[in-house]
Image: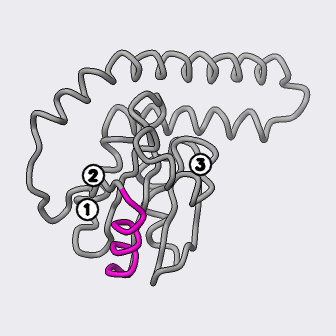
């Protein structure tokens, strides 16, 4: 299990505790929201610092796609083609400057490798493809949309764990 997946899981558990606990635990709830807020700020600062380095690295290390790789797309036509060619497609709308997106990055890649041949995993960088994010009404990052047989069947925003992503793909 990757570090990002572990952190995301812990933060999701904290958020579930905050939402489901009674009013009598108000001090714990407030402390929980402060921890979540600080985690978001820290992850965004790390992502912003990493952004230029990863952009340069990505440009220098272009490689051919193989089975199980995530597919980075840059146009609506590319996305529609993939959606209609594959029975199940998971589309990750993300940005390099987004901390929660960076936490999910390795998890998305692991899911792509695990579901090679069963589902296509597509990444859309909204910084470079604002038209696609508007077309699919993406309002928060990261947002994951699952398509089955050409139709959108599920959409989730926020950082997700590997088990949550697998649950989205396997949901019929």
Say few, some or many: other residues with alpha carbon within 10 Å of mark 1 (under 14 / 14 to 19 / 20 or more): some
Q: Position of residue 170 (x, y in %)?
A: 45, 72
Kindly identify the residue that appears in the image at 27 percent across and 51 percent down.
110
The residue that mark 2 highlights is 110
Q: Are marks 3 and 1 in contact (CB under 8 Å)?
A: no
Say few, some or many: other residues with alpha carbon within 10 Å of mark 2 (under 14 / 14 to 19 / 20 or more): some
Q: Is residue 29 above or below residue 68?
A: above
Q: Position of residue 127 (x, y in %)?
A: 44, 38
Kindly identify the residue that appears in the image at 26 percent across and 55 percent down.
70
Kindly identify the residue that appears in the image at 33 percent across and 61 percent down.
121
Residue 136 belongs to the span the image colors magenta: no
Q: Main secondary structure of the magenta part?
A: helix
Kindly identify the residue that appears in the image at 48 percent across and 22 percent down.
44
The residue that mark 3 highlights is 157
The residue that mark 1 highlights is 114
In the picture, residue 115 is in which quadrant?
bottom left
Q: Secondary structure at mark 1?
A: helix
Which label sits in the foreground, 3 or 1?
Answer: 3
Q: Position of residue 92 (x, y in %)?
A: 43, 53
* Earlier residue among tags 3 and 1: 1
In the picture, residue 4 is in which quadrant?
top left
Say few, some or many: other residues with alpha carbon within 10 Å of mark 3 (under 14 / 14 to 19 / 20 or more): some
| In-image side of 1 versus 90 (left or right) | left
| In-image side of 151 versus 72 (left or right) | right
Q: CA distance from mark 3 to mark 1?
A: 22 Å
């Amino acid at each position: 299990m990757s570090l990002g997946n572990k952190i995301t899981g812990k933060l999701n558990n904290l958020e579930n505790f905050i939402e489901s606990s009674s009013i009598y635990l108000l001090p714990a709830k407030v402390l929980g929201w402060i921890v979540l807020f600080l985690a978001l700020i820290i992850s965004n600062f790390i992502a912003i610092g990493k952004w230029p380095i990863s952009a340069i690295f990505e440009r220098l290390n272009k490689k051919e796609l193989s089975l199980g790789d995530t597919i980075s797309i840059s146009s609506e036509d590319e996305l529609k083609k993939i959606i209609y060619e594959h029975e199940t497609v998971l589309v990750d709308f993300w940005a390099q400057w987004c901390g929660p997106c960076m936490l999910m990055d390795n998890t998305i890649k692991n899911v792509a490798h695990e579901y090679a041949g069963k589902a296509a995993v597509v990444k859309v960088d909204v910084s470079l493809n604002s038209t696609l994010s508007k077309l699919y009404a993406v309002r928060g990052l990261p947002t994951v949309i699952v398509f089955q047989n050409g139709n959108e069947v599920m959409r989730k925003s926020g950082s997700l764990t590997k088990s949550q992503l697998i649950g989205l793909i396997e949901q019929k």
